Amino acid sequence: MIITRTPFRITLGGGGTDLPSYYTKNGGMVLTMAIDKYVYITLKPDYFESLCKLRYSEIEITNDISKLKNTRARQALLNHNLTDVEINTCADLSSKSGLGSSGSFLVGLLKAIKEFTQSDSSPKSIAEEACDIEINQLQEPVGKQDQYIAAFGGIKILNINQEGKVEVSKFSFDYNRLINNMRVYSINVYRNASDILKDQNKSDSKTSNILDHIKEYGYKTIELLKNNSFDEYGFLLDSYWSLKKQLSSKITLSNIDELYEIVKTDYNVLGGKIIGAGGGGFLLLYCNKNHEHLDNYMSSLGMKKLNYNVDFNGSTILGNHLK
């Protein structure tokens, strides 16, 4: 049995500029952070039955992998001509959390497949194949951030040129101070990001103009964090969130907008956003003091706090018991 562990992520700046409709014309830039919340995948060959057994939120058993409903797993297995295998998945967070779960799942599965087939399992190789599967083969309305940060881990600047080539650079700053102020809470609403991303993955002038500003905010984020100007980053998040909501009517929820105004007024919140494409999952709030006051208020609303830190390993083989 092969066991992989692959991190989820939180975007710090530039989210959305990694979509093909934007970077093919303007180039993209995302500052992103892998966190120590994971999807775990086990893979083992089935020597006695000519079946593919796939367990995630559903259970699929078939003798024809082309009939798998899980499109990412199906395509990955088809690409590597794997048939008689058993794959099991579990995760620390929901598959619709807004923290890059689909990309993390695919990266973790490819890590296991490449370990099994003894092929190139470098972070770059896995990230590129995951992007090719999602963007080109499956035509999903996704970008390149999730696959790369899941594969590489750490805190990374992803520069994407117009041909889609991704340059991965390390980014160092006092992240512990940021994480202490950057509180994350479950809003108990989960959604499929595809519909929201379809709205964002447009090439019209309005969308392009908004993403131009988001990319500028991304470069400003790098500057602020490098200079330990964390409160200014909190205020920048507020401006970013106002801008991002213009990309789609599905990005936010009316009760979250009301909550957001309350915590800014009464609980020392300088800015925030719904993490990921929007519409549900987790709410990030930057609070520079009296953190317990905010935590208690959010808890009273049934919104649990996510305790997290940075993952610096990326997708990892925890064990290979086939050798």
Image (tube, helix red, strand yellow):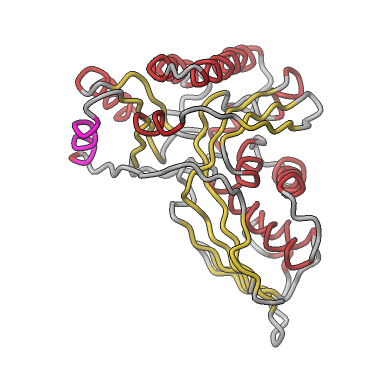
Give residue 232's quadrant in the image. Answer: top left
Q: Is residue 80 placed above or below 221 in the rendered structure?
A: below
> Which stretch appears magenta?
291-299
Report which quarter residue 206 is drawn in. Answer: top right
In the shown orientation, is residue 81 left or right of residue 200?
A: right
Please state which of residues 227 and 68 is positioned toward the viewer in this rendering.
227
Where does residue 282 sit, x and y in percent of width and height?
A: 39, 38
Q: Tell me: residue 268, above or below residue 317.
A: above
Q: Quadrant of the N terminus?
A: bottom right
Q: Is residue 313 left or right of residue 169?
A: left
User: Magenta span has 13?
Assistant: no
Residue 22 in the image: state x and y as whole percent: 69, 23
Q: Position of residue 219 (x, y in %)?
A: 59, 16
Q: Nearer the viewer, residue 173 or 130?
A: 173
Q: Taking 244 as reference, is 266 left or right?
A: left
Residue 296 in magenta stretch: yes
Residue drawn at 59 percent across, 13 percent down: 216
Residue at 37% x, 42% y: name it. Answer: 189
